[in-house]
Image (spheres, rainbow, N blue to C red):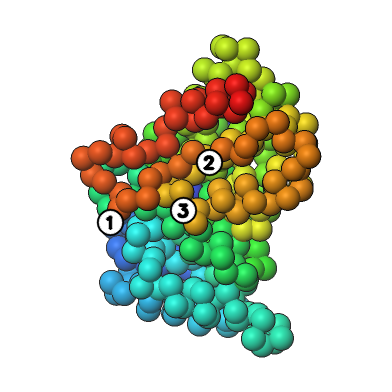
Amino acid sequence: MAKMNLLQAINSALDLAMAKHDNVYSFGEDTGGFGGVFRATSGLTEKYGKHRNFNTPLVEQGIIGFANGLASQGSYAIAEIQFGDYIFPAFDQIVNETAKFRYRSGNEFNVGGLTIRTPYGGGIAGGHYHSQSPEAYFAHTPGIKIVTPRNPYEAKGLLLSAIFDKNPVLFMEPKRLYRASTGEVPEEEYTIPLGKAEVVKEGNDITVLGWGAQMEMTEKAVEQAEKDGVSCEVIDLRTISPWDVETVTQSVLKTGRLVISQEAPITGGFASEIAATVQDKCFLYLESPIARVSGIDVPYPLCHEKEYMADHLKIYEAIKRSMNY
């Protein structure tokens, strides 16, 4: 085991993938010799050459269009979109091309080797163009998987699974944790299955669910709640699409309560999809309404970021309201 932060774990996964196959390519804006704006691809150009880790023009639609073409010919294409907020010019390519390649050809051709890496979320004083959490836009589209890790160990294992998965994957990296989250990570290759949530902590009174950077907030909230005698079951969703309905519903059938936390605004967020599914499958077992703790329905504010974020105190208050319903 080596101690790594989340960025180093991602870099290690990319390094191992590129060493494993000569047709693994990494590219994006400033990802070549500069190593990307966050340095996630540092050292890869020096190690594998400019033809395998390289810069692209500043055109997101072109990056994903190129990635689709590369993946459709059998290569593993790892495309970086510099910030999740910048992914929208590529929305057409991702939704209408990437996600539909396999379907429209009857599996005669596909872009299963495509992985789109992008940092998402707030907590870095980035304002409204560098802080959004756009996962719900893409979760509405069949044909693409969406994955977000909570720590370095998860990041490396999930990214290696994503790169070699047979389906295109949008891999969303919580930028607030890039250097803040550290932990022991195996130096060798390992994988974590996509589509499988993890029960991080078992409990009996209430289920608390999140993904990505919200897991840190969730764990702090649960620590407070347990001082009040509340036994919390904590679940990291890991994969947003397809999400692990069985693990979540089995937990709620046991606890009878559910709090979901997301960074994104509340309206149309993925927490709403989870809540609708859980109430459909667990309605007669619910002891209180399902709670969603989220961002607010406003553009992401710069000077009021702390008030906007769904922090541990807001999650803690939701747990208390649910328990006292």
Q: Amino acid at mark 2?
A: Arg
**Residue 315: % across, % down:** 49, 30
**Residue 71: % across, % down:** 55, 76
Work out which residue is located at the far front of the displayed protein and give it. 325
Mark 1 lies on a secondary structure that is: helix
Sequence-first tag of 2 and 1:
1
Location of residue 39 with respect to 103 vertically, above or below:
above
Using residue 152 as the reference point, say whether residue 202 is left or right of it. Answer: right
- Callout 1: few (<14), some (14-19), or many (20+) C-alpha neighbours within 10 Å? some
Q: Which residue is nearer to you in this view: 137 or 56? A: 137
The residue labelled by disc 2 is 292
Q: Amino acid at mark 1?
A: Tyr
Sequence-first tag of 1 and 3:
1
> Which label lies toward us, 2 or 1?
2
Mark 2 lies on a secondary structure that is: strand
Mark 3 lies on a secondary structure that is: loop
Residue 84 visible, this orientation: yes
Residue drawn at x 67%, y 20% as measured from the top left:
231
Using residue 87 as the reference point, say whether residue 129 is left or right of it. Answer: left
Residue drawn at x 52%, y 80% as measured from the top left:
96
**Residue 168: % across, % down:** 59, 68
Residue 4 visible, this orientation: no
Measured Cα–Cα span from mark 2 to mark 1 = 24 Å
The residue labelled by disc 3 is 267
The residue labelled by disc 1 is 129
CB under 8 Å between callouts 1 and 3? no
Q: Quadrant of residue 259?
A: top right
- Callout 3: few (<14), some (14-19), or many (20+) C-alpha neighbours within 10 Å? few
